[in-house]
Image (spheres, grey):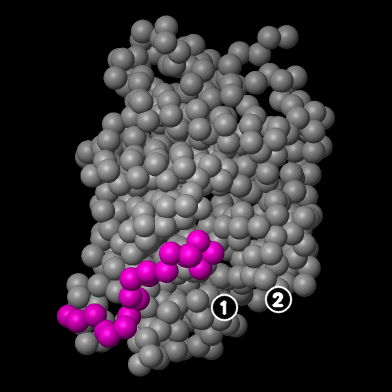
Amino acid sequence: MKIQPTALLLGALLFGTGGCKTFLDQPVLGQYEAGQFFTSDTNAILAVNAAYVPLSFRDASSNALWVLGDVASDDAVKGSNPGDQADFENIDIFNITPINAAVEAQWRRYYDGVFKCNVVLDGLPDGNTSITASVRQQAVGQAQFLRAYYYFQLAAIYGNVPLRLKVETPEELQSPALPQAQIYAQVEADCQAAMAALPATWTGADVGRATKGAAMALLAKTYLFEQKWALAATTAQAVEASGTYSLLPVFANNFRAATKNNAEAIFSVQHTSGLSPNQGNNLNQWFAPRPQNGYGFFYPTQSLVNNYERTSAGVVDPRLDYTVGRSGQSFFGVPFDPSWSSTGYVSKKHLQPLTEIPTTTKGDGNLNYQAIRYADVLLMDAEASNEAGNSANALKALNQVRKRARESYIYDTTLPNAGTVPTGLLPDVTVTDQSQLRDAIRRERRAELALEFQRFFDITRYGQAYAQQALADRPNFNYARNRFYPIPQSERDTNKGL
């Protein structure tokens, strides 16, 4: 029998992003076929809102990107009690099978996102005149960007995966996994289409939606992962030349609710607390130590702490204390106790103080997740330029990131002896040897983007020698076996095309 493109259950569309709250107060109207649903601007916006939902961290156990991206790396361990979330612990020790809960959850989540994007794209063809032309263009552009983002993540996590570009029949869903290169090619195409359709910025309640710059930055990152160095560099430089983004004077303001959706945020997953249905950030509760009313997962490692540079006088890169709670430092206004954590450290980037999110609503934070920020683009430019043989441009981009980090001492009055950059702190890199500069860029990327759920994918794309050295303390790690996560058993059971 012929299956209609989809029947949309509007209850699912009520879970829009925090930046689009005006579209959430819609009644549940029942089920509609796609042709009956895409008949108004309001419905088109509801459908594209639904495509953002899988990005959110409303439930940190079902959006396990933090597990796959950082717990598996040398930056973090699972934390909490042994046996608590055993499958997350199995990621930590590389005892990973196709029935692992984190492996299953992320696959399901991102393919749900792909499906919701395809609903929008199928429902808004050129011939749909029921939707205002501008609304249709922007909705299609957002769906193209989001589909590109989901497929970029799927390819980075799982390698070869099925490619679904429309709402498929059960027969069509029996599809093989395509080579990662084909997935990236589709990501490139979707990013380029989204760049042509999306505005440079949004205003008001629409702040947080995908933009032209977000699509361009994702395209640059895709080229980087494909090792298309010249294209990655020129695309990152186009983001820089747009004039839309800039580094914040204080690094930590990227991770404070009061300063979210700022000039450095290229694409942020929006979270808003106090809404029904819940749209808050649940990472706050999962990552906080137990004495601070958290679950105590996700502890930084000594290896990560050692990665941060220090001056000869012992002054540390300020990003360390913006990123990690440690002994001798204030932890959101209270002395840090190293006994709170099995490693002696606690992640800070995704936490909010109890003065903002009290114990009664600890799991409903309003801190965004920074999926792509401008510092990441500068480091993409630095890496790609160096690999393409342009050390001068690599140094220019790299040193912008270092300058911002050290000058936090000028702008953040809470730092000791604020107002002056400590002597010898994070000096500009001047080395032009490609191998040495590569090492400096990789170290900088680790310091700048620590605990933002990207490290494992950097480790593995750097190659086998780097990965084996970084994960030398994980005896079960095998590069050939663990470079990509296995396709989940649930997909293997239902998709006979694999």
Q: Amino acid at mark 1?
A: Ser
Rendered residue at 34%/36% (across/down): 211
Magenta stretch: dominant SS? loop
Dot 1 alpha-carbon crowd within 10 angstroms: few under 14, some 14 to 19, many 20 or more: few
Could you tell me if residue 293 is visible in this image? Answer: no
Rendered residue at 37%/86% (across/down): 311
Q: Is residue 421 magenta?
A: yes
Q: Is residue 326 above or below residue 38?
A: below
Q: In the rendered view, does 407 fall on the left or right side of 57?
A: left
Q: Is residue 137 above or below residue 396?
A: above
Q: In the rendered view, does 464 fall on the left or right side of 31?
A: right
- Secondary element under disc 2, as helix, strand or loop, is loop
Proximity of marks 2 and 1: CB atoms separated by less than 8 Å: yes
Query: What residue is disc 1 on?
Result: 303
Placement of the C terminus among the 4 image quadrants:
top right
Rendered residue at 47%/35% (across/down): 146
- Secondary element under disc 1, as helix, strand or loop, is helix
Q: CA distance from mark 2 to mark 1?
A: 10 Å
Query: What residue is disc 2 on?
Result: 473
Rendered residue at 51%/68% (across/down): 436
The magenta region covers 419-438
Q: Amino acid at mark 2?
A: Asp
Question: x and y percent of residue 24 in the render?
Answer: 36, 36
209, 317: nearer the viewer: 317
Placement of the N terminus among the 4 image quadrants:
top right
Question: x and y percent of residue 394 in the render?
Answer: 40, 57
- Residue 388 is marked as none
Could you tell me if residue 415 is visible in this image? Answer: yes
381, 88: nearer the viewer: 381
Q: Is residue 92 above or below residue 135?
A: below
Using the rendered view, name the quadrant where residue 247 is placed. Answer: bottom left
